[in-house]
Every structure is written in C-alpha cells, then in structure tokens.
Image (cartoon, rainbow, N blue to C red):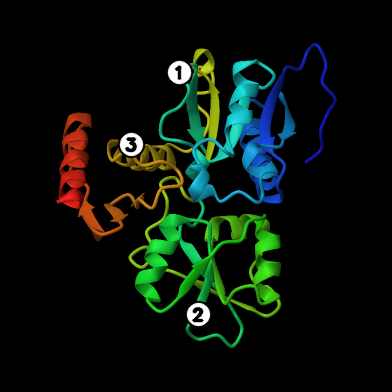
Amino acid sequence: MSKRPPSPERPTIRLATRKSPLALAQAELAREQLGHSFPDTLVELLPMTTTGDRRRSWSLEERGGKGLFTRELELALEEERADLAVHSAKDLPTELPPALALAGFLPREDPRDVLVVRAGVDVPRRIATGSPRRREQAALLFPEAVFGEFRGNVGTRLRKLAEGEADATLLARAGLNRLGIASWPGLVFRTLDIEASVPAAGQGAIALQCRLSQAEHYSGVGDRVTGRAVRIERAFLNGLGGGCHSALAVHFDGVRLHAFMPGKGRKSWPHPKGGEAVEQAWLEACRKELLA
C-alpha cells in the first residue's frame, strides 16, 4: 500500500506492533482496516520488541506468560507514544490495565490448530510445543508421546521441526494463513477439528487496543461478530481465573461454546437466546458444569 508523508492537514495514527513477521503481517491488516475507517488519516507502524521476544530461552509456562508479548505495547499507549496497539487476541491477558480498553477486532481467521509432522511420521512420539493448552490436548490424541518445547517465530519452528528436533509441533492455522504458508519442505500439515483441539480464547482474532479515553473514537473499527465471540471467550476464561498461557481453552463459534480443562476434558454448550443477563447466567452455568 502506498504511503503519503504526514502533513499538518493529515492526522496520523501511530500503531504499536511487535517486530515478528506474523505481527507485522497482522499490523498491515490493521493498517488497511484503519485506512477504511479513517480514510484521511495516515497509519504509521511503530515496531517494538517485547520481553517475550527478547527472552527466547525462557519457558513461557514456567515464567507465566501473562503480558510477556503485550506489556511494552501497552506502555507505549499509556505514555502516549502510540495511539493504538495491535495484538494477537490470544496473547492478551484477560485483565487489562485500567487506563486501556479494547477498541475492536479484525475479522477472525480460521481459529483451528494445525498438527505439523515430519514427512513419514504417522504417529508422532516427540512433540514440541510451548503451549500447555496444546500439550494437554495433544496428549489425549497421542498418549505415548513425550513433550518438549522450542521457541521462535513460525518459520524458525518449522525449520527446527524439518531438521529433526521433534516429530511434530502445533501451530495456529490463522498465523500460517496470514504468512502465506501452505506447505514446507519435509513437513505435512494436518488441521485439527475444534472438537480435537479447542483453541485458545481469541485465537485467530487480531485485537486493537487503545487508551480508555479514546475508546469511543475508535468504537466503529473492526468486526462486530468477531468482537462478540472473543468477548464471550474472554469472559468465560476470566471467570475461571485463566490467563493467556494457561491450559484452559475456550472457543465460541457463533452457535456453541467449546471448552477444555485438564482433568475435566472437553465440553460444549449451545448459546441461549436472550439479552446480556441471560448470557451471563449461561456463562456461569457453563463454568460450573466444566468444574463439576
């Protein structure tokens, strides 16, 4: 997309983003959406490195992943160095800083997980994933497997897998689609049904975050269907005390709510008809049933 230089007559939206290839691809989608919503405004990307990006040797599970990929972007908002921040919605903690709000969400991509295996491997014995949620559900599919972890961007993980560091890994279909990766030499991609691997809350959605004082200004940005689904997922997860790197999983497909909890298994419930009060009561009933 061509960019015109800023001028006094043309305001600028500063969009904070991570520097990874996937984050930048998502930021370009956000830039395009903002261009439609604010056609006379220049959207400027502010790429940043987060703690999670710098600490590649850290285990996200051991460190507690809340905020590791989002906090630096949120600080840029709070300090007014940025006007919006673009996040993978699944990376956002369920509790936001009090001065910040979610402005909206871009239309959701395919939310499913993909099992990526080395060619010739029918049943993977060594599975690498840093996600407790994926590990717990993959263990039900492959009870004989042992689990390890490797970090890095999508391309790095695919390269490590192809080089034999593991038999399989799990990735988000949405990220692969946004990067244009449909195949990789020496690897086979198997998309998993929601019933086999319940996605993380917000998986496949891109979130736009702003200062609370600017929430009304940006309220028309984004996709309402995606926003409703992700807010249902985050509300369900928040009621269980789950964070973005817990093993809890929840996905709303517009008709049913799907959930997974270690030791409880997978469950799903049809969405009721009614207003906000009915929906809140339904979410609470679903949580109680999952915990029973």
Q: Earlier in the sequence, mark 2 or mark 3?
A: 2
Mark 2: secondary structure: loop
Q: Position of residue 122 (x, y in %)?
A: 50, 86
Q: Earlier in the sequence, mark 3 or mark 1?
A: 1
Quadrant in the picture for residue 209: top right
Residue at 44% across, 45% down:
202
Camera-near label (2 vs 3) is 2
Q: CA distance from mark 2 to mark 1?
A: 44 Å
Q: Are marks 2 and 1 in contact (CB under 8 Å)?
A: no
Q: Which residue is mark 2?
A: 124
**Label 2: few (<14), some or many (≥20) within 10 Å?**
some
Residue at the extreme right of the image, as rendered: 5
Q: CA distance from mark 2 to mark 3?
A: 33 Å
Q: Which residue is mark 1?
A: 98
Residue 95 shows in the view: yes
Placement of 202 over or under 180, stated as above or below: above
**Label 1: few (<14), some or many (≥20) within 10 Å?**
few
**Label 3: few (<14), some or many (≥20) within 10 Å?**
some
In the image, what residue type sits under mark 3? Asn
Q: CA distance from mark 3 to mark 1?
A: 16 Å
Q: Earlier in the sequence, mark 2 or mark 1?
A: 1
Q: Which residue is mark 3?
A: 238
